[in-house]
Image (cartoon, rainbow, N blue to C red):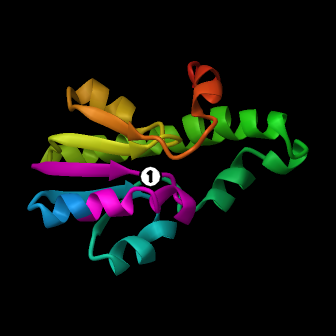
Amino acid sequence: MRIAFGTNPAVGHVLPLIPLALAARDAGHDVVVVGGTGVRRLVEAHGLRLVQAGPPDLDTVFDAIDAERVPLGPRRAVLMWSQGFAAFLGRPLAHGLVELARDWPPDLVIHEDSEQGTWIAAERLGIPHLALQATAWRGTMARVSREP
């Protein structure tokens, strides 16, 4: 089975996926991680392959959406979720999975719960997908992702 793991480009986002990706690989499945280059060293240190998609790191995302203009707290969390994770990161991660699927169509997509691009692409491609729940606030923020 071919399994693609989708992650936002930060260590805290990819870490929850690593044990599952290693277990899948060790069970004989072909595994790739789809994400930004900021997680490349960690992914490759575990003997996994990174398929680059999206911006390299979260600092790039924060700068692009001008997160510093909003004080820390719930309003910044909403901005990060809707504009950062859903819009700015979601689109290129979705495109990355679509591109990957042209030559290496996954049988399954697993993503960390704040990564919102690969599951949308999987849905459109008819690939089963699931989220690894790694945060406590996804349910609250899901509604702000609808539009982006």
Q: Residue 89: x percent and y percent? A: 53, 44
Q: Using the image, determine if residue 123 lies above or below residue 47.
A: above
Look at label 1 and name its amino acid.
Thr
Picture residue at 30% right of the left edge, 26% below the top: 123
Residue depicted at x 52% and y 58%: 9
Residue 85: quadrant of the picture: top right
- Locate residue 121: give its quadrant: top left
Q: Position of residue 66 (x, y in %)?
A: 79, 47
The local secondary structure at tag 1 comes to loop
Closer to the camera in the image, 57 or 136:
136
Give the camera-side residue of 109 and 24: 24
Query: Is 18 included in the stretch rendered in magenta?
Result: yes
At 65% across and 32% down in the image, what residue appears? 82
Q: Quadrant of residue 52?
A: bottom left
Q: Is 77 inside the magenta-drawn segment?
A: no
Residue 113 image point, x, y percent: 48, 40
Q: Which residues are magenta?
A: 1-22
Quadrant the C terminus occupies:
top right
Residue underneath mark 1: 7
Position of residue 55 measured from the top left corner of the image (x, y, whole percent): 53, 56
